Amino acid sequence: MRYVTRKLAQTVFVVVVVTFLTSIALRFLPGGTDVIVALKTGPGATPEQTAKVLEELGLNKSLLGQYVSWVRDFVTGNWGTTFRTNQSIATEVKRAMPISLYLMIYGQIFALGLAVPTAVWSAYKQNSRFDRAATTSAFAMLSMPNFIVAPILILFFSVNNKWFPYPSLYTSLFDSPIDHFRAFALPTVTIAIPLYAGYMRVLRADMIGTLQSDFITTARAKGVGTGPMLFKHALRPSLFSLVTSAAVNIGALMGGVVVVEQVFSLNGMGRLTVQSVIGREYPTVQYSVVILALIYIFINLMVDLAYAWIDPRVRASRALG
Amino acid sequence: MGQLSTQSRRKPGRLLAVLVISAGLIGAACGGDDTSSKTTDGTSPGSETTGPGGSDTTAAVATTAPPPTSSAEMQPVPGGKVVMGIEADTSSPWRPSEMVCAIGCYQVIRNIYDSLAMANDAGSWGPYLASALTPNDDFTQWTITARDGVTFHDGTPFDGAAIVENLKRGKEGILTGNALRPVDTIEVDPADPMSAIVSMNTSWAAFPYTLAGQVGMMASPTWLAASDTDDTLKSKPVGTGPFVYADYKADESFTMTKNPDYWNAPYPYLDSIEFRVIPDGLNRRDALKSGTVDLIHTTNGETISEFRDSTDFPMVEIANNAETSYTLLHVTQEGSPLTDVRVRCALAYASDEQLLIDTIGAGVQQIAFGPFSPTQVGYLASTGFPEAQDMAKAQELIAAYKADFPGPLNLSLATTQDQTNLTIAQQQQQWWTEAGVDNVTIDQIDQGNYIVTALLGNFQVFQWRNHGGFDLDQQYIWWHSKAAPPVGELALNFGRIRDTQLDALLDENRASADPARKKEIAEEVNRLFGTQCYDLWGSYTVWGIAGKSTVHGVNLFTLPDGTEAPFGAGIAGTFYPMTLWVEQ
């Protein structure tokens, strides 16, 4: 319990720091608030227009005052509109978020779904032909950046064979599951390839160590079948590195989806953030960054809490400590 | 994205659109993925078009005929949907007085809004949404009469008050106001509530051309008032056009559905159109080939070359009244070497535009020696502008300049962050250095800042695309000294050209209704640009409209007065989606 409380407290602290720094970032832009006003109203803003923009963005308040009003706006969904297209920022983020989440989740599921059985069997049949093929191919996949993989997939599966659409147009899962999965197929594979390779190698290494443990030998001696021995006894204690890796990869995925979303023209958070940076849509960048940061913080919290469940030894040591 | 062989010749940022405002039509000086190359005569048989006054202005045929015989013989069938890939979204959508409109924008929004007038293939204009545009004797006053029985999509009647509301907003717009500078008053005709009277402080015979574009696009006054207080409504336009707004996702898509009560029957044929934003030209091509979209527009040379030979994806090429890709010079900046004609012309002599067209543009575009493309009034095959690279001449001119002004000769060349544009800039840097310029620095400016930089005059040399249109008057705000305030103030005369001879010609053209004299004036302007080297001309843009073989109707259409509206209608590269139909 103490462990959980400590973790929660740490999380709250990180959230406050991240949101505070993000909320006041507009003050430190090159060109100052004049740039913001010009972007919002166009060149030649009147004093009244300038005052209105500064008021809307809290730039006429103290740092703490700006932070408080920013948090209030954030929590109530009053995020303002984009400079260039007068779209509600909240609506834009709400539209983009599911796309990125789907992409990350599908990528992780696909990668883990392939990596876990491959790694387990590869470790069990170490140095076999299967093991050598799996490790060699994983090494090759790790060497292929997604901006190389994507065009190859597009050329073969979309342009030449028309099996999958390009650019990928997002369709809601609830509107048309088939179109939804077709749109995400190629981007998911693109994202998943390097993930799979990394996970496979990490899990395989841990499994090899675990399979040499005394309790595995005991299980074998007691007549436990291969399947239960591998997936029930050996896999769980081998998951630490994999879980850590998967959690850390969430941060990397957020960067990775930017490239994939750009190539496949999927309007997710990555693409929204990049275009907002390029287009100097600063408020949009602020909210995008905070959302992504909060997701990352939350997932890492879940992973930390999950450690105790994964390995009873952690629970025991926490209880003692 | 920025593949060397075929990508954008110049993409001065999608926000360049500003041009919209210009005299009504101007397509954007904006970038898409255009690639310069050579369009030769023979792009299509029988489609030579000449400028107003008829005759021998053209060298090259500029517009291909519509798709093959079978398509021409088929009858349009109502129904269906088309998805079209376009090159860019629009800034400040979609109120006419605020939107920063490039070609992608026009291609979308002219389906929602009708314009009061439209250019026609007789080299003149005709009323469109207005039933009449009537000048007084000296063109200082125009009476615009609204077409009877037309309502906006929200039921608001289209009348004199609606015209007044829209034009007043246009006059107050930061950028559109420049196009309406000569206008003094706009009011409803006291004798006719269906008419508006526009009074000017000068003779303006070409005023209807301004009304053929963004400034003349009529939006519902009810919607305009509501969106004054609700920013999110601004992106849900309400007009009188053949299609009605359905959905808009910024940087992604614009969907519209058929207006069943459209006044210009039998249009439209389609039940709906979706415009999908796919900025990269090759991605757009691939989207068509993969079946994700049904139709695309492109200036990408590789794509145009490929589809010229394709039977799977018939293509119509549009080059009439085309924009010109060029290098814009700031010619009156204090202390700048570009104030000297020798330096400007030296840069022109040092450049090999044909090489750029052939290597980067796949040979598709036609080299330009002036601002007017074939079929535009004022086009000349030879203008006095350097027609081929002559490095010796360039070096001679630079040496002569340096003899009078000793010291380093430095230039700053601005471009976007597009890779192909950077490649072009690097080539220019190499040529100009060889010609004798001591230092050429390249500044890459992000697209969001590009147009503002141009507006404020904070540049020396700039890559650009502009000057499509039908009448010289549409170039007024780009070239007249009235539109060239000091650096730091907004100016649509980006190059800050202040030439009294040019001003006089533009003023005379504005007041003239004589086609023959207007043609002479435009040709004089062309020669002036040629001899003064105010800009470094590159190539004339060719647009390809390619689609699946089941999509038909990329056609001209007949205006209410019986003339035909040509492709582009002054907005280079555009066509009329209301004429589209699909095989059912």
Image: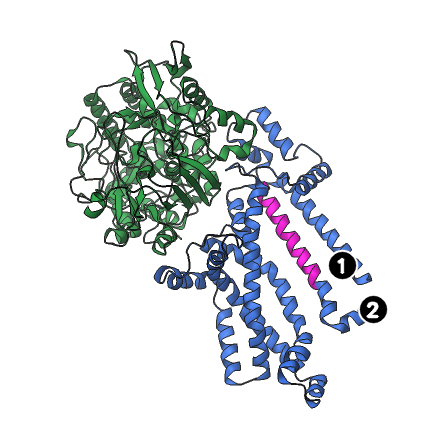
The picture quadrant where one finds residue B343 is top left
Q: Residue furthest top?
A: B191
The CA distance from mark 1 to mark 2 is: 15 Å
Nearer to the camera, A53 or B529: A53
Look at the image and give the residue range highlighted in magenta.
A283-303
- Is residue B348 rendered magenta in the image? no
Give the number of the disc on residue A319: 2
Does residue B181 appear in the picture of this structure? yes
Secondary structure predominantly adopted by residues drawn in magenta: helix
Q: Chain of mark 2?
A: A
- Residue nearest the viewer, comparing B22 with B481: B22
Mark 1 residue crowding within 10 angstroms, few (<14) / some (14–19) / many (20+): some
Residue A294 belongs to magenta span: yes
Labels 1 and 2 touching (C-beta < 8 A): no
Rendered colour, chain B: green
| Chain letter for the part of the structure drawn in blue | A
Q: Amino acid at mark 1?
A: Lys
